[in-house]
Amino acid sequence: MNKVYLLTGGNVGNRQEYLARAAGQIAVETGKIFKTSALYETAAWGKTDQPAFLNQVLELHTDLEAGELMKNLLSIEENMGRRREEKYGPRTIDIDILLYNQDVIQTDFLTVPHPQLPNRMFALKPLNEIATGYRHPVLNKTIQQLMEECTDPLPVKKFSQL
């Protein structure tokens, strides 16, 4: 059984509903979700002239190998209306593999740990909520340490529906 941390996010349509639907599809098609972080809202990263994102980290236990898991996640994104038209552009759903066991994977198709994880507070903050002591397999630092060292200036706050 593989322990995987996924980051889900989106900034188009009913963001909360899209994250819930994505989690449901992930559970049906890839494995069992053991933990979920709270929802976090942050301004768009990379391309800032768009609506704020909602993000959530999921701890997934799966029998799927990393490449097969990534193919399934891309299929879920596509089925939920994700179109890759613009780098860092608006999207209904985005699902990234942040960590896969303690594996280091580098192929043309997939890089794990996610190469931008140490630079993105919107990924670190929800990950830290459910995996504080987890050690990054390349940097050999805990998620808490990475969060403390992260220089990403965008505020990341827990989302509360009014």
Image: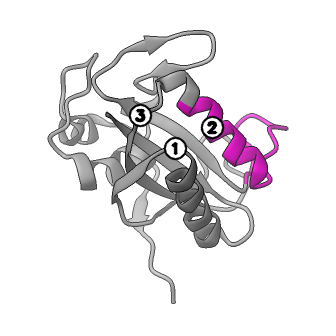
- The residue wearing badge 1 is 30
- Tell me the element at label 1: loop
- Given residues 15 and 122, the one toward you in this image is 15
Q: Residue at x 25, y 19 (%)?
A: 139
Residue 15 against residue 84 in the figure, above or below: below
- Give the magenta part as a residue range: 69-91
Please state which amino acid type lies under the numbered disc 2: Asn
- The amino acid at mark 3 is Asp
Q: Is residue 85 visible?
A: yes
Of the pair 47 and 5, the residue shown nearer to us: 5
Residue behind mark 2: 72
Marks 3 and 1, how far apart at CA: 8 Å
Query: Residue at position x 27%, y 23% from top?
Result: 102
Task: Give the structural element (helix, strand or loop) at label 3.
Answer: loop
State the residue at coordinates (74%, 68%): 13
Q: Position of residue 90 (x, y in %)?
A: 74, 51
Q: Position of residue 30 (x, y in %)?
A: 52, 44
Q: Is residue 34 above or below residue 144?
A: below
Residue at image mark 3:
63
Earlier along the polypeptide chain: callout 2 or callout 3?
3
Do the residues under discs 3 and 1 have CB atoms within 8 angstroms?
no
